[in-house]
């Protein structure tokens, strides 16, 4: 299936990180300077099939990968942000030992903030696309309400863990899978969602199934605080561009420019795309790429 | 000692029966980097029921998964699998196992008949503010205890208000008057907050077991 502007990667390879096979996708010449694209939760590398070629056409080697359990990477027994970051380091180290451009979207943006703080030597520039979690409304709730919500989250999560060994992704038609994904991506076109099925799902005898590990689920609970990500920003030393979306969506963080401005690193830029949802680079690929390429040119 | 294998997602967990019995079971949760004892410890001699011990993921005879990714919440799932098998239990946790025991008491207050939190490896956890984390990739294969478990679970953040939420779930919903006993000498911030909650008692392991055997 074709989609306007979408291009399959020029190269595919696997990187084994700590025993876990990670599927890597690349566009552009191997001789060009690398840009690493980090996808969001429940996405996969080929959601960049339109955006990545725009950067490659401007003279960059664009590399992305499927996080463990996503896309064509291995499904694992355990998942965590730290494990995702170890995998990210493995992919980056397999490509270059020099500082490189990192562009992270959503969860990939939050991950990249943590790595930029922990291993700044890997970053020449950092672009964060709607991946800056801020204080969640839950902190304003009364204690008894927080306790009740935790109880509900725990019950749901433990139930999922008890049945997850036998779970399988539900099969469906190509259109059916596109419609299901549309609930999480309500602003994206049916044509794009249909295209995503063809690169993010597999076709079995009984229908299409998303490749993502069925043991993974949205939500959950834990001690992590969204504001911990923002608190890492002021100390970042590499050129920084933050991009936020004006329209709130189910997969977004609900972060506003006012939430982030106090935390911007010295010289950092924050841009707001009006009338745009969480998947900024999919809704407005040309404008997003142009903004980022301008940012990179100025920093070169 | 006999052992049953429990399935938790893609992990096979070893639940050891250290001593048979027909009363309410005692479930032991080990510390970070430890494994279940091979025999019922002497301090369980007065416990009227059977004594079980669980090897957490990556420890003892349980599966050592590839590539790490540990969290306390995952180990709560391990402990929940053991509790589900036993039906109900009094739980004694050491170190990391004490933190997991507290979480289990909050998650399953109707099934956990008393929890005793004891000193042991991995009691403190990591920083409770964002830090510049170190990351190390370890080549497989590796054996128990999983080096990734030692890394991930020695630094998982345990904010006091998070542990208090589990404490309140246990206090509010347990049928027992004193469902949580703190028996530790060391009190990291999360545990100090737990001990400060009205309804949590501070007493020795031996005294706790006597009280829970009675209830």
Image (cartoon, coloured by chain):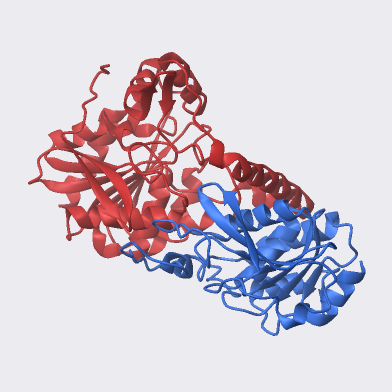
| Quarter of the image where one finds residue B185 | bottom right
Observer able to see residue B113:
yes
Residue A9 lies in quadrant: top left
Task: Tell which of B162 and B62 is nearer to you.
Answer: B62
Image quadrant occupied by the N terminus of chain B:
bottom right
Q: How many marks?
A: 0
The picture's colour for chain B is blue
Going 45% across and 48% down the picture, which residue do you hit? A132
Q: Residue furthest left?
A: A31
- Provide residue B200's location: percent of width, then percent of height: 82, 70
Residues A66 and A133: in front is: A66
Q: Against B196, is A254 above or below?
A: above
Image location (x, y in percent) of residue A154: 67, 48
Between A47 and A267, the one lying in front of the other is A47
B3 sits left or right of A51 in the view: right
Say which quarter of the image contains residue A122: bottom left
Q: Is residue A253 above or below residue A117?
A: above
Query: According to the rendering, which colour does chain A have?
Result: red
From the viewer's perspective, is A10 left or right of A211? left
Q: Please state which of residues A13 and A228 is positioned toward the viewer in this rendering.
A: A13
Is residue B161 visible in the rendered image? The answer is: no
**Outermost residue toward the bottom in this view:** B185
Identity of the residue drawn at 71% across and 52% down: B85
Q: Residue at x 82, y 53 (%)?
A: B110
Asked if A214 appears above or below B47 in the picture, the reply is above
For the point 76% across and 81% down, the residue is B43
Q: Where residue B62 sits in the image (x, y, percent)? A: 53, 61
Q: Quadrant of the C terminus of chain B?
A: bottom right
Query: Residue A39 placed where, x, y %?
Result: 36, 41
């Amino acid at each position: 299936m074709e989609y306007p502007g979408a291009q399959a990667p020029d190269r595919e390879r696997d990187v084994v990180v700590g025993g876990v096979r990670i599927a890597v996708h690349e566009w552009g010449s191997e001789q060009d300077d690398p840009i690493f694209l980090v996808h969001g939760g429940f996405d996969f590398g080929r959601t960049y099939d339109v955006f990545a070629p725009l950067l490659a056409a401007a003279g960059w080697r664009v590399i992305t990968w499927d996080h463990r359990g996503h896309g064509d990477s291995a499904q694992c027994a355990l998942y965590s942000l730290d494990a995702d970051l170890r995998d990210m380091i493995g992919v980056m180290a397999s490509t270059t030992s020099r500082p490189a451009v990192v562009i992270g979207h959503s969860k990939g943006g939050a991950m990249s903030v943590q790595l930029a703080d922990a291993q700044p030597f890997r970053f020449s520039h950092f672009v964060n696309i709607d991946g800056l979690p801020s204080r969640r409304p839950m902190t304003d709730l009364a204690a008894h309400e927080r306790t009740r919500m935790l109880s509900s989250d725990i019950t749901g999560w433990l139930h999922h863990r008890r049945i997850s060994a036998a779970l399988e992704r539900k099969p469906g038609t190509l259109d059916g899978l596109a419609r299901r994904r549309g609930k999480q991506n309500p602003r994206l076109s049916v044509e794009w969602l249909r295209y995503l099925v063809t690169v993010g799902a597999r076709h079995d005898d009984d229908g299409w199934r998303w490749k993502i590990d069925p043991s993974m689920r949205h939500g959950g609970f834990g001690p992590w605080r969204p504001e911990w990500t923002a608190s890492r920003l002021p100390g970042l030393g590499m050129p920084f561009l933050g991009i936020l979306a004006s329209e709130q969506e189910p997969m977004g963080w609900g972060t506003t420019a006012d939430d982030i401005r106090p935390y911007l690193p010295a010289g950092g830029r924050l841009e707001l795309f009006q009338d745009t949802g969480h998947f900024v680079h999919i809704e407005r690929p040309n404008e997003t790429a142009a903004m980022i390429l301008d940012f990179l040119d100025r920093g070169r | 000692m006999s052992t049953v294998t429990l399935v938790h997602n893609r992990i096979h967990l070893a639940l050891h029966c250290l001593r048979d019995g027909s009363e309410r079971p005692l479930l032991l949760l080990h510390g970070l980097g430890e494994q279940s004892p091979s025999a019922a410890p002497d301090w369980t001699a007065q416990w009227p029921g059977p004594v079980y011990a669980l090897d957490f993921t990556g420890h003892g005879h349980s599966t050592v998964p590839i590539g790490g990714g540990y969290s306390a919440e995952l180990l709560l799932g391990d402990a929940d699998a053991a509790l589900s098998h036993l039906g109900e239990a009094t739980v004694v946790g050491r170190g990391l196992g004490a933190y997991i025991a507290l979480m289990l008491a909050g998650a399953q207050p109707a099934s956990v008949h008393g929890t005793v939190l004891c000193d042991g490896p991995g009691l403190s956890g990591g920083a409770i503010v964002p830090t510049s984390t170190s990351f190390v990739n370890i080549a497989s294969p590796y054996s128990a205890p999983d080096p990734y478990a030692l890394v991930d679970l020695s630094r998982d953040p345990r904010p006091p208000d998070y542990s208090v939420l589990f404490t309140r779930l246990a206090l509010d919903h347990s049928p027992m008057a004193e469902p949580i006993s703190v028996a530790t000498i060391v009190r990291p911030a999360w545990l100090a907050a737990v001990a400060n909650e009205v309804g949590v008692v501070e007493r020795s392991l031996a005294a706790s077991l006597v009280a829970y055997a009675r209830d």
